[in-house]
Image (cartoon, rainbow, N blue to C red):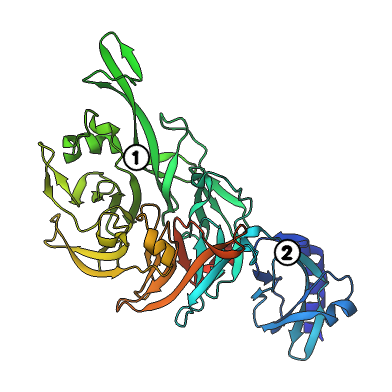
Amino acid sequence: MYKVSLVLLCLTIWCCQVEAQVFPKEGSELYYRIIGFSVPALPSVISYRFEIAAGSYANDQDFEKKIKINTLSKQHKVIAEVPSFGSRYTWRVSYIAKNGILSKSMLFHFSTRTSPDVDNAVTRLRVTKPAERYKDNYVFIDEASVLYDMKGKPIWFLPGKKKQDNPNKLPRDIKITPAGTITYLQECQPYEIDYNGNYLWHYDGHETNAPLDTFHHEFTRLTNGHYMGMMLDNVILKQNFAKDNAFRKDSTDHYQKIGFSNLVELDEKGHIVWRWNGLDYVTHSDLSFMKNSDLPILDLDFHQNAFYFDEKNNYIYLSFRDIWRVIKIKYPEGNLVNTYGPIYSANDSVLQGGPFCYQHSCKLSREGYLYLFNNNHCGAGNVPTVMMLRETVPGGNGLKKVWEYQCTIEDPVIAHENPGFLSGGNVQEMPDGPLFVSMGAPYSKVFIVARDKRVLWSAMPERYNVEYGKWGLPIGVYRASIITREDLEKLIWNSERE
């Protein structure tokens, strides 16, 4: 009797605190369908029954007629998937002791918002090979700004996304962080949000000579809570010859504004705490030998487009697309350790070739192999490949290919008119070894390939072509990423912290 009275007292107290301790909060408008439901834990309660109905109801009788989800949990929280976006829902919890139901909560209400990006009549992820081994994974498609399950069903979308004519203004590089949050770039600025879409961090400083502190291509939260990204900068340099488009002329001297990229680390307050200077690298490496007609080296676009921080061993791998190069940098010293790809001499000749070209994305595998998405724009057929490479001699700049997978193009039109792959693409090692790949433009297929080259899952993100009345417009995926069910649950519960 004492225990029952105690529980009833706790329930009374709980009802007074319900607004602050129940998720989803009363009246919430959610951007996702896989939802974390939670209530305060109570003593002597051995299980919690979560009931969810489609629609909005004010009394138990109407609610009970429409219950669609009925889940019994030993914990005071549960994750459940509701059927659709753009819908209203009602839910409640029953508290169960050994002797039966002690009490039922009040009715709670929430709704799911919608967007053309999660409307299956407008946008879809068409699965071409179903998953068996990875049924519980989820894929971020950045241009659509949607998280899909492996059946191609949208389960989350990025709130506040604005459609722009300029694809560079669309969200890019959406991915999970070690802290169980989400980072992405939009309009060349980095953001960190939780699962609910609440802003947790945004860089709003101005620490360069660029018109804006412009980030590009890739942005990552590190395990120490800092952030790393590539930031454009400008410098005004004197030129040794006259130029009609000189930025400034002083007497007979000519000056030009030069753009380049730094790799920067920012702390939680957005202060730059470490910087690798791109200008110093270009002017003090073999790249200073390169010439393009009468233009100085700094007029050339090396297109710095990806990096990977090996935090365990304190090395950074940095990719330059247009010179087919990946370099290895020691952190925090910043000194160059190795160069992979073509190397130039003083007479502008190539001393050494490279096994990849126009690569996009570079990372380090569990075995210590460098792996990357090779756009292969200069190769036979211009069809991208995924490559794993190792140093031929430890510490040397030669690379030996240890594994390669040639991507396939099933669309006959794109296969026939393929202009070459230059934009986007990504590869990400799965926890157990296979590789998740997104191919980038103009063919945005995403897939998982095993080390024995079996395709374990594949899908095409597409939009409906209103003009021709059919599906087939590939969504211009820049970088897709994949997460596990464990990752998703961490995202969900982290978003419910008070």
Chain-order first, disc 1 or disc 2: 2
User: Is residue 83 rendered to the left or right of residue 227?
Assistant: right
Disc on res. 262: 1
From the top left corner, tell me how far across and down residue 92 is, in percent: 78, 75
Q: Nearer the viewer, residue 479 or 337?
A: 479
From the top left corner, tell me how far across and down residue 463 is, in percent: 57, 61
What residue do we see at 44% from left, 81% from top? 133
User: Is residue 418 rendered to the left or right of residue 48?
Assistant: left
From the top left corner, tell me how far across and down residue 397 is, in percent: 15, 54
Number of residues whose C-alpha sits closer than 10 Å to that of mark 1, classed few (under 14), some (14–19) or many (20 or more) = many
Res 375 visible: yes
Is disc 2 placed on a helix, strand or loop? loop
Q: Nearer the viewer, residue 280 or 117?
A: 117
Disc on res. 86: 2
Is disc 1 placed on a helix, strand or loop? strand
Quadrant containing the N terminus in the rendered view: bottom right
Q: Nearer the viewer, residue 199 or 292?
A: 292
What residue do we see at 32% from left, 62% from top? 383
User: Is residue 55 rendered to the left or right of residue 436?
Assistant: right
Disc 1 vs disc 2: Cβ atoms closer than 8 Å?
Answer: no
